[in-house]
Image (cartoon, helix red, strand yellow):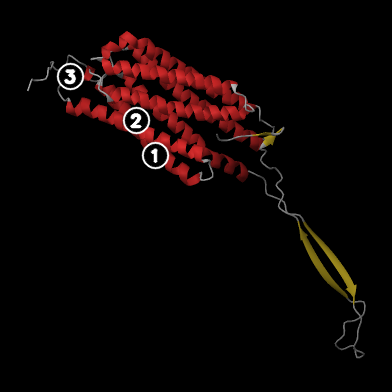
Amino acid sequence: MAARLQIPPGTVRLDDTLGAAFLGHTVTTLLYGITTLQAFIYYRRNQKDGIKLKLSVFVLWILDSVHAGLITGAIYWYCITSFTNLLAIQQPIWPIPTMIIISNLSNSIVRCIFGYRLWKLSDHSPILPSIIAVLSVLIFVDAVYFAIQLYSIPSYTGISKFSWSLYVGLSVESAVDLTVALAQCLLLRRFETGIQRTDSVIRVLIAYSINTGLLTSLCAIGALVSYAAAPTKFIYFAFYFVLSKLYVNSLLATLNARGSLLGGARRGARPRSRVQSKIAFRTPTLSTDPSGSSAVEAGTNIEFTTVISGGEISTDEIVESVKDKRIETFP
């Protein structure tokens, strides 16, 4: 058996190659645990959701599991199987490009769900969802191209030959995420009514939209900038490993927050009033016993009281519709 080609320790820096990839893997596994927990909570609390949304969440969890498994397998190969073989660090192995395809497939599904939300918020206008769909297809095709090229090169330094694909994909991805977040904020602001509790729910939804869009955009920008600054290091791996997990967790957090948002708004309502009316009928009775011992004296009033209770009336109902437009808090 031919001996593996080895190079002396110290020639390759491990801190910014395997070290960066390992940190990215650590964060990825933590986020995968949160994804699993959120998926479990979703199926327990949101049983009334449509079958399409439930199926989408299940598919996303499966893809997220495969994503985590591929990264774990790659890190195991680099750190354990190829231990002391420092040249192997620069060698792309099949789990990495496969992970890129799985990651972008999962991200595309999440963007489609957010695009569907924009379609509903914009009175079924097809403009924004169409733009998001076209750009999502572009991102996915670019990712597949990048992955295919990565399968065929012997070293990560070969990425420089098609690095334009990485720049295009991450740039468009960041722009799309910011567009989705901005569009949701602008559309949600249209439903502000001046009622404190309704507007507070809308402001929370706007905050969710901003946070989810900014997180994924900043992560994509981090991967882009780190590759541009250090293309021979694996710092961009750390950002890219985490990116898909942020997409899935942002969607699940939004879905699971629906009940608490509406519940909190209802708990904040003022005490409900109950309308009660008492109507007393007085009827005189006549004595039939001459002795008057057991009779009720004439003119004695017997009071019959009837209580008429009105239904519970909320003094400040949550406004779900403004000018015949229903406020949607979920896809």
Q: Residue furthest bottom?
A: 291
Relative image position of residue 97 (x, y in whole percent): 31, 22
The answer for how far apart the CA atoms under marks 1 and 3 are is 35 Å
**Rendering quarter of residue 60:** top left
**Rendering quarter of residue 259:** top right
Q: Which mark is residue 86?
A: 3
- Judged left or right of residue 118, residue 72 is left
Earlier residue among tags 3 and 2: 2
What SS does tag 2 mark? helix
Residue at figure coordinates x 85%, y 87% from the top left: 294
Identify residue for label 2: 67
Label 1 crowd bin: few (<14), some (14–19), many (20+), radius 10 Å: some
Q: Nearer the viewer, residue 299 or 313?
A: 313
Residue at figure coordinates x 87%, y 85% from the top left: 295
The answer for how far apart the CA atoms under marks 3 and 2 are is 25 Å
Earlier residue among tags 1 and 3: 1
Q: Nearer the viewer, residue 94 or 314?
A: 94
Relative image position of residue 325 (x, y in whole percent): 68, 33
